[in-house]
Image: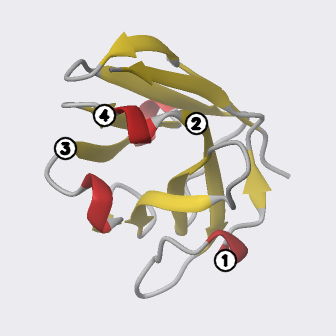
Amino acid sequence: QVQLVESGGGSVEAGGSLRLSCAASRNTASAACFGWFRQAPGNEREGVAVIRFDGGSRGGGTDYADSVKGRFTISRDGAKNTLYLQMNSLKPEDTGMYYCAAGPWRSRCRVTPSEYNYWGQGTQVTVSS
């Protein structure tokens, strides 16, 4: 069982930046997919960014939703068991509850919520125009 706790959300103006963090409750050194997802009121949960971890100190590929490419960066600090999402040039449409998630290793991790089985409680991001 892995518990995930997000932090770093808040309210910013359009064009601003935030960095989200997701701390894992235990060593997540085994190979897996990790990701950030978001959900706005009335909308389905959607994938934002994912990263593949190949175990040990080996990182893998990343993938992003088209809407955030070039603005968001996902990364992982294995020593701290922490996942990050750096969000730059934020837009009002980025507003929502952001969740981190972990799922089984795949050769290609995808921004598909159903492929992840551990979820955090979420952190709110609000971007004003």
- From the image, state whether disc 2 or disc 3 is nearer to you: 2
Answer above or below: position of 41 versus 124. below
**What residue did someone put label 2 on?**
96
As drawn, 66 above or below 97:
below
- Which quadrant of the figure has residue 64? bottom left
Q: Secondary structure at mark 3?
A: loop
User: Marks 4 and 1: which is nearer the front?
Assistant: 4
Q: Which residue is the site of mark 1?
A: 115
List x then y, in percent, for residue 107: 42, 88
Disc 3 designates what residue? 71
Residue displayed at 76% across by 56% down = 118
Q: Is residue 101 above or below residue 105?
A: above
In the rendering, at what x and y percent does residue 29 appear? 54, 54
Q: Are marks 2 and 3 in contact (CB under 8 Å)?
A: no
Residue 45 appears in the picture as rendered: yes
Rendered image: mark on residue 91: 4
Q: Earlier in the sequence, mark 3 or mark 4?
A: 3
| 26 relative to 14 in the view: left or right | right
Q: Whole-Å distance between the Cαs marked 2 and 1? A: 21 Å
Q: In this orientation, which residue lies closer to the viewer: 46 or 54?
A: 46
The answer to which of marks 2 and 3 sits earlier in the sequence is 3
User: What's the colour scheme?
Assistant: secondary structure
Front of the two marks 3 and 1: 3
Q: Residues within 10 Å of mark 4 (few under 14, many from 20)?
A: some
